[in-house]
Image (tube, coloured by chain):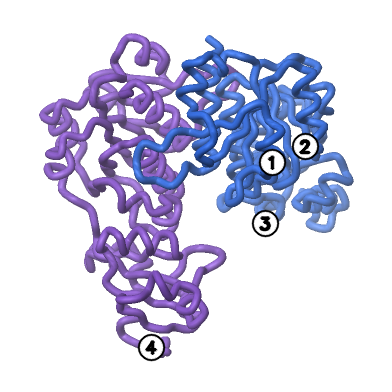
Chain colours: A blue, B purple
Amino acid sequence: MLSSHNARLASARRLTSRRDRREAGRFLVEGAQAVREAVRAEAVLEVFATADAIVRNADLLSGLDVAEISPKDAAGLSETVTPQGLVAVCRAIDVSLGQAFGRSPRLAVLLVEANDPGNAGAIVRTADAAGAQAVVFAGGVDVYNGKAVRASAGSLFHLDLVLDAALDDVLAAAGGAGLTTLATTSGTGARDLDQLADDGTLAAPTLWLFGNEAHGLPDAVLTAADATARVPIHGRAESLNLAAAAAVCLYASARAHR
Amino acid sequence: MLSSHNARLASARRLTSRRDRREAGRFLVEGAQAVREAVRAEAVLEVFATADAIVRNADLLSGLDVAEISPKDAAGLSETVTPQGLVAVCRAIDVSLGQAFGRSPRLAVLLVEANDPGNAGAIVRTADAAGAQAVVFAGGVDVYNGKAVRASAGSLFHLDLVLDAALDDVLAAAGGAGLTTLATTSGTGARDLDQLADDGTLAAPTLWLFGNEAHGLPDAVLTAADATARVPIHGRAESLNLAAAAAVCLYASARAHR
């Protein structure tokens, strides 16, 4: 069993910090399901696991570089309330904007200044489920944050991730890739999602733009997008939460694409 | 300013426990937006607020029974990371199953053993936004939990809530109220949401059944429902998270109803 002071373990522990993740080009993935997806994506560099977890996940771990650690050290690598005793160090898997849009996605997402890691991860998962090919992040939370990785339930390995994108670059590249840009807002000037489905707009290859949980998208983005869209509110709620709005929009596109 | 040992404050503090909420028939609502909805619903019994919050929310609080408390005591009433210094004690607002279904809802939700308070609150918010008239809880989390109340963003005051419902009663009452019961599952035997939209099933008054985050709905419920439904997965995600699945299903109904 590795000592708590082991240098590799100490390096892994530093990956709970965003700056250290970015410097190292590495991030942590926790739990059997997510590690399985990381293995499939050939992203795993090394694995830390408790004795229990090594026994429980023998099949999954065969052929990997696995170091045994104490349950306490496993908790130190975890950002969850109930650590699973199994953490993989993965190489960063994000690609450039050019690579992502060069693959001619028919459905993609741009998240602008989203601040909640659970939302970011849930949106990656929903985007994957809805058949999107890329999720682009401009500012906001780091999708390699442990809570975001966990909320993505492995989906971050299934599509192209682009990090630290500049807004102007994304909008220009979307035009070049033939993507219609739809900026979500609760503003009254926006077109209703049902209208966009009925008039055929959603049938086009689409980049959906979602903003910050509290402030939405900047005005400049609303102006620059091809159209603004809002999820209709039929009851008395002021709005949907970000992840729910993204689910409704992405599935409206998925339906229109089929 | 009330002492930390004040009896009313101590009673309010006990409402952070589910059992005490149920015994008292009261629950806590935090923050200006939610308290405003509670006032509109005539559910507020008394308010505890810091000196700052009393000044900030003077309009909202006029005519209410407000007691000033310290920031520390406000944090003790809060289940959020950043307490807002404003907490209302509200009377329980749930209604009986007979009352809720007696109003002939066209769209309603049954949550069976949902365990995450954030999910429960988010689904209440989404149900409100999609125009649902009722959300019924059978087992699982308490929607009067502080995190659930917060995630509902005031929507729990906008529709009929039914708590502690027995599954058999709900299914029988749904039949009596003319509601088609659609049980969500990721099972392969289920009908695809797009098919249910295309064949007109979703146009009927509907009770959507959603299960536990990890285990889904019990088999007996899947069998007893009028139909089983699954959200189509177009990518490589195994499933959607509960709140996202609910958003997609409820908005598919809302669109079919219009």
Secondary structure state at the residue bearing disc 2: helix
Residue at 49 percent of width and 37 percent of height: A244
Kindly identify which chain the residue marked by label 1 belongs to.
A
Reading the image, the residue beneath label 2 is A167
- Of pointers 1 and 2, the one earlier in the residue sequence: 1
Image location of residue A120, percent across then percent down:
63, 40
Q: Amino acid at mark 1?
A: Val
Which chain is disc 3 placed on?
Answer: A
Q: Which numbered mark, 1 or 3, is in the foreground of this view? A: 1
Q: Which mark is on residue B5?
A: 4
To which chain does the residue with label 2 belong? A
Nearest to the observer: residue A185 or residue A105: A185
Q: Is residue A237 above or below residue A124?
A: below
What residue is at 56 percent from the left and 23 percent from the top?
A129
Q: Is residue A38 above or below residue A119?
A: above
Residue hosting label 3: A72
Decide: few, some or many residues near mark 4? Use Cα within 10 Å; few <14, some 14-19, many ≥20. Answer: few
